[in-house]
Amino acid sequence: MPILGSFGAAAARGFGETAGAGAIDVEYLVVAGGGGGGKDLAGGGGAGGFRLSFGTTPLSSGETIAMAPGTPYTVTIGSGSGGASSAAEGQNSSFGYADGTFSATGGGRGYGGQISTPSATQQGGSGGGGGEGNEGGYTPAEGNDGGSSTAGGGGASTAGSGSTGGPGGAGAPDANISGTGDATYAGGGGGGGYIGNSGGPGGTGGGGNGGNRPGGSGNAGQSNTGGGGGGGGADGGGPGGGGGSGRITFRVPSSNSLTVAPGTNTTGTTPGGDKYAIFTVTGTVEVS
């Protein structure tokens, strides 16, 4: 997947400051689609990449982006991958802004016992079982590595377990960007079970559980969390679960407003008066 819209500390601005020609600085949370779990004694899918400007969590960058008022920007919500033999990398989530396009990378697929060699698609925002995370090369990192090839997929906060049938990596909190309470996203999928161990649990933040032996199906990652799908159980060709779709949240000062399309996406006001918009499907956003 291409690297889009990375920027460093020199681009950081204070919340509510402008960036030339009246542009408005916007806080964001971006979660990409999760990777699918592999088939038959399989690794869990990696969580979708997680990128956050808001708050003071370990993954908060503190760097806002600028949007020109009155300009509609495209917002793309990455879909999760299918599972089992159709497992692949999840899709990027991204949005336009005044200086280009900002993106988080889809999660890597989980390795499968019926796949003879590892694949580059095991890499992603977080790696599927056997794959590397932070494919975009961002700071803070957008995700973590998966465990061994038959273990859990990586999550936004921690790597997947290194053991067969291990749990998926933990997701990360959104720092209460919408003012409606902390939520956790981008958990890795659990690895599929083998002799002596059940399928691993999915990571907090929407990761799917791995399937049990013999031949149990991995659970899908939760929709709009970027969770990775659980790996399939051994002995019987257990199918893996698909990855969960991503999401994007924006926040602006109380003196500004956000308009979204289509109406499936929502807007609201935080207890302190700031405005927010939550995208669960692809659409457009406009700030004023």
Image (cartoon, helix red, strand yellow):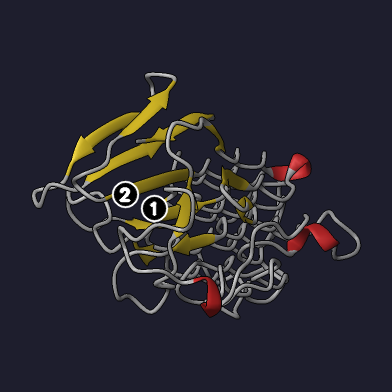
Left or right: 23 in relation to 81: left
Left or right: 41 in relation to 159: right
Reading the chain from its start, which is encountered first: label 1 or label 2? 1
Q: Residue 23 appears at what percent x and percent y? A: 44, 49
Toward the front, the furthest residue is 21
- Find numbered disc 2 in the image and state the secondary structure of the residue it sits on: strand
Q: Residue at the spot x=55%, y=53% of the render?
A: 228
Marks 2 and 1: in contact by CB < 8 Å? yes
Left or right: 53 in relation to 4: left
Q: Residue at the spot x=72%, y=70% of the render?
A: 131
Amino acid type for the residue under numbered disc 2:
Arg
Toward the top, the furthest residue is 263
Residue under circle 2? Answer: 251
Residue under circle 1? Answer: 26
Q: Residue at the spot x=64%, y=48% of the render?
A: 92
Q: Residue 68 appears at what percent x and percent y? A: 48, 42
Give the crowd class for mark 1: few <14, some 14-19, many >=20 residues within 10 Å.
many
Amino acid type for the residue under numbered disc 1:
Val
**Residue toward you, 9 or 125:** 9
Res. 203 image quadrant: bottom left
Give the vertical position of 50 relative to 62 (above or below): above
